[in-house]
Amino acid sequence: MGDVTNRPVLVLNRHWLAVHVCTVRRAIAMLVQDIAHVVCEDYQTYDFTGWVSLSKDSELPALPASNGRNGNSSNGNGREMNGIARHNGGNRSSNGNGSNGINTNGGKNGHGQYIVRTPYFAFLAPRVIVLQHYQKNPPRSVRFNRRNVYLRDDFRCQYCSVAPGHERLTLDHVIPRSRGGLSVWENVVAACERCNARKGAHLPGETGMKLSRKPRRPSWMAAVRLHTSDEDRLLWTRFVDPKQLCLSPAD
């Protein structure tokens, strides 16, 4: 079982626009500080104490509904918050990232939901949170660099579809630079060393090679999609255009 607190959480601004993706650990820190609230499938929001209270019901459906309870009714000063605070050395802000005392390998409940456990209580790992005050718009672009190209291309060679590992991946210009090709999203792909050497300074068609999908400039959401499971995507598509969570196949 991987580290539950490193799982991705979609972050919405106060206008319910997706603006970021953070870890469960970071989300918990923001919940404890009442910077953000958890968003459920039915769009009900819960502060930290309300979310922990809801999570105590082990028979919750896969994505819990509100059952008429409003998590915002809590004053946020319950034992659950104090327990987190104690394990953060008495500092509830915990530099914005710490959640000491949390069992990072919390596992799942009977419905397949990820659980975060502390020495005092357990609660469902949030998947979507909404910020209470932040209202800036989503980022408009993704920085063009080697790692982001690898992320966009799933760390796979775009010619043979093999995933050779980060160390054996290279960047290939579809239209070679010697022929005027530019170093832009639409002309650079991840390629294994073998395919890169085979293609050389040629166009793909000249060597009988074909791209597995057309390279394009990714949205900021597509740049992080590799860190999301199908289960997370199902909920996230309520707040994000599904097209932003996938890449188009080659023509």
Image (tube, rainbow, N blue to C red):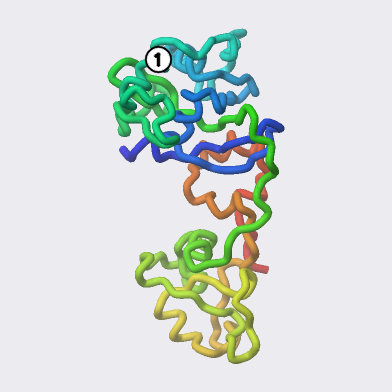
Circle 1 sits on which residue? 80
Task: Indicate whether 110 appears above or below 139.
Answer: above
Task: Indicate whether 181 appears above or below 39.
Answer: below
**Residue at 63 percent of width and 80 percent of height:** 182
Q: Residues within 10 Å of mark 1 (few under 14, many from 20)?
A: many
Task: Indicate whether 208 appears above or below 169.
Answer: below
Task: Indicate whether 236 appears above or below 214.
Answer: above
Quadrant location of the C terminus in the rendered image: bottom right
| Residue 206 place in picture, x, y as percent | 58, 89
Q: Is residue 232 left or right of residue 86?
A: right
Count of numbered labels shown in the rendering: 1
Q: Hey, what amino acid is under mark 1? A: Glu
Quadrant location of the N terminus in the rendered image: top left
| Residue 14 place in picture, x, y as percent | 67, 31
| Residue 84 place in picture, x, y as percent | 37, 21
**Residue at 47 percent of width and 70 percent of height:** 157
Quarter where residue 164 is shown: bottom left
Q: Is residue 27 left or right of residue 122?
A: right
| Residue 102 place in picture, x, y as percent | 32, 27
Quarter where residue 239 is shown: top right
Q: Nearer the viewer, residue 132 or 187?
A: 132
Quarter where residue 17 is shown: top right
**Residue at 57 percent of width and 76 percent of height:** 210
Q: Nearer the viewer, residue 117 or 48?
A: 48
